[in-house]
Image (spheres, grey):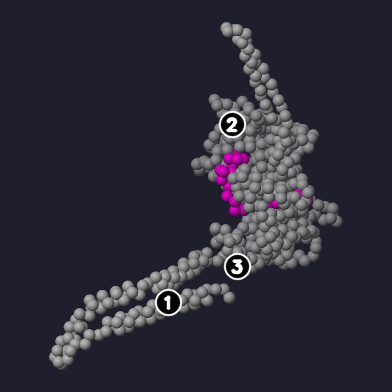
Amino acid sequence: MARTVLTWWIPLLILQSFLLAIAFGSNEVEEEFSESLLLKPLPDRKVQKFRVKEMELSFTQGRWNHEHWGGFDSLSSMNAKPVGVELWAVFDVPHSQVDTSWKNLTHALSGLFCASINFLESSTSYAAPTWGFGRSADKLRYGSLPREAVCTENLTPWLKLLPCRDKDGISALMNRPSVYRGFYHSQRLHLSMVDSGEEGLGSGMLLEQSLTVVLQPDTVYDGKDLQPSWSLSSLFGRKVVGKCVLAKSSNVYLQMEGLAHQALWKNEEFELSTQPDRILRENSSFLYIFNIDKSSDSEPFDLGLTWKLPSKWSCQQAPLHASRFLMGSGNERGAIAILLKATESQDKLSGRDLTNGGRCTIRANVFQIFPWYVKVYYHTLQIFVDQQQNTSGEVLKKINVSPSTDKMSSGMMEMMLELPCEVKSAAISIEYDKGFLHIDEYPPDANQGFDIPSALISFPDHHASLDFKEELSTLPLLSKFKDKSLVRSYTEVLLVPLTTPDFSMPYNVITITCTVFALYFGSLLNALRRRIGEEERFLKSKGKKTGGLKQLLSRFTAKIRGRPAESPSSESTAAAQSSVLSSKLLFKIILVAGVAATWQYFSTDK
């Protein structure tokens, strides 16, 4: 995690050099040199423009496995994010300017991180939570893009915010192929205002960057039931050759859970390749601290762990494991359900509410956003506790609903549940209808379906932290993990299939209509541009060529009968043929016009 303090002013350095040459004669020259440095504080225009009090942006690929990777520790509570892009911000502006500041912020971040964050500017893509998100702020805006693909174009701007980028220090381990081949990776950027005296800093902005990656070591199975051994070079393909020259401290931490009393770096269970500089004891784990200040090109830092004996341990989980799914079939209506299951560590968790008449309860806040084309019927909300429907108000303590408006705003629901500690399972279901979109509102991959953002489940009575007895003020990362953070978890992203039209039909209609009109206007123009005189001469010449045999037979018959040969009138013949041709042409024109009128009548929507 990188922490950077941005002050409110940017120093403007003006270096002036004066060189004065004075000639006192033809052979002697005296040089005089002077320099000065002018410092002038300038206001930070971006901070004044957006007036952001606190902001967090995350790019995530993959879903955090709360069952196997933990859900009740500081790492998962702060760095486990939903799939895609998540952005929330608190503004220090009047209420009438919050939406405008949000839109400007999304456009600025979209250009900075090469992402489609500007799609969150629409009122149908963000919401204004009050208390269900975990932060009580009346000027809070929240938006999510589940389908946003995360690639190196998003990681490169994130690395450029670091003082040494990815050229030196621990950030040099951020090898792109190694990062993106993992099961899960999430890059997070958190920006907050710091008042004078807080955290030992002056007034300004505190920038925190964290990259969370879940990797699997590349090891060959040797027939033993051992965990795979690993090293930094095998995971990232690189070694640490030194710290960033601008960093105050550069440390590598290794947290081992499930160890009873083995605090040594060489023991009967495992062995570390490098001796740690410091070992800290936590309630259920040991933390090994390695200082990389002495590493160099000749002696790079490459931490490795080799297992000697099979070892099993489990990460501490949240009080309830949440999962969300769809119910129903067809393209007309359905239901959204959230299932909460008790975990194995439920009985070991502290912070339970015993003030409610001496009854042990677990409070859970549920925050969901529904797109406008998913028309939710909030009166159909049902709550089941241990497979029994609960109709009383003992479980549902508080609810806040914001209905959606077609093509204007998305829907939002915030619920506070109070469940008994001995609960085994709880379910929430709500019905919805599927809306219809205009043909211009469908995305290019409409047949894939439409996404509903992840729901957030938080437990206000439970906080995660690392309990160290030593003073950790000089270690920023451990100081952050020592602070209490709200236990929260995100559910799956739902994929809802909507009624999708046949996008090839407009093409077919256009081609058939153009063909009919081409035939109609082609025949009409042919009839208008045709010359009658040329047609008559053409018919005369044609009659001369084909009528020779007929005339010869008529003359031979007349001689036999003793009568003179009668020559047919050429004018009457040409007129008859011309009339026949005109009638055929007229019939074609009327036929084409009739077909066009019939097509226009049946193709027009009534």
Image-quadrant location for residue 176: top right
Q: Which quadrant is home to the N terminus?
A: top right
Residue at the farthest right position: 357
Whole-percent x, y for residue 121 in the image: 66, 52
- The span picked out in magenta is 135-159
Which mark's residue is nearer the viewer, 3 or 1?
1
Mark 2 secondary-structure assignment = loop
Question: Where 236 falls versus 396 (above or below)?
Answer: above
Q: Which mark is residue 589?
A: 1
Q: Which quadrant is home to the C terminus?
A: bottom right
**Residue found 69% across the figure and 36% down from its top:** 3
Q: Which mark is residue 168?
A: 2
Mark 1 secondary-structure assignment = helix
Q: Amino acid at mark 2?
A: Asp
Q: Amino acid at mark 3?
A: Asn
Q: CA distance from mark 3 to mark 1?
A: 47 Å
Q: Nearer the viewer, residue 365 or 344?
A: 365
**Residue found 35% across the figure and 81% down from its top:** 579
Q: Which mark is residue 331?
A: 3
Whole-percent x, y for residue 394 in the image: 80, 61
Image-quadrant location for residue 552: bottom left
